[in-house]
Amino acid sequence: MYAIAIVRYRKPLEDVLKVVDEHRAYLRDLKARGVLLASGPLEPRYGGALLLRLPDSTDTALLAVRDGDPFVKHGVAQYELLPWVPNIGGDALDHL
């Protein structure tokens, strides 16, 4: 299952930046485990986006990604989780 996570800051950027190193370490771990394919901030910088690949199609896996993020744990951001079925380019994603 693929998903897109839109991360929106709930606090001013200066508060978010206090947690950004912890957040990026979490994302590096997701990448190492094959869960995160790509991530980065939005422009203007009011949040970010994640492209995820999860082993199953349950909401539990998506919620675990959200709930494990230090941004969420520290209350500086919220997630919008969007399960996604890529019709074009899915084969390329499967090889990442």
Image (spheres, rainbow, N blue to C red):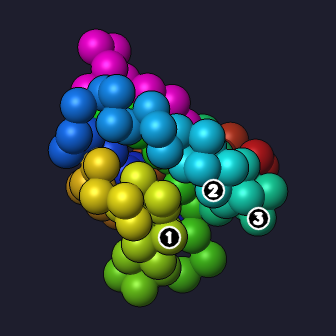
Q: Position of residue 56 (x, y in %)?
A: 54, 81
In the image, residue 62 sits, relative to residue 81, either above or below, namely below
* Residue 68, numbered circle: 1
Residue stretch in magenta: 39-46
Reading the image, the residue beneath label 2 is 26
Main SS, magenta residues = loop
Reading the image, the residue beneath label 3 is 33
Left or right of residue 20, residue 58 in this image: left
Task: Label 3: state its secondary structure.
Answer: loop
* Residue 4, numbered circle: none
Task: Label 2: state its secondary structure.
Answer: helix
Of callouts 2 and 1, the N-terminal one: 2
In the image, residue 63 sits, relative to residue 19, either above or below, namely below
- What residue is drawn where x is 29% and y is 49%? 77
Query: Which amino acid type corresponds to the residue marked 2 in the rendered image?
Result: Tyr
Of callouts 2 and 3, the N-terminal one: 2
In the image, residue 3 sits, relative to residue 49, either above or below, namely below
In the image, residue 75 sits, relative to residue 48, either above or below, namely below
Q: Is label 2 or label 3 in front?
A: 2
- What residue is drawn where x is 22% and y is 40%? 11
- What residue is drawn where x is 48% and y is 61%? 69
Mark 3 is surrounded, within 10 Å at the Cα level, by few (under 14), some (14 to 19) or many (20 or more) other residues, namely few
Task: Label 1: state its secondary structure.
Answer: helix
Query: Which amino acid type corresponds to the residue marked 3 in the rendered image?
Result: Arg
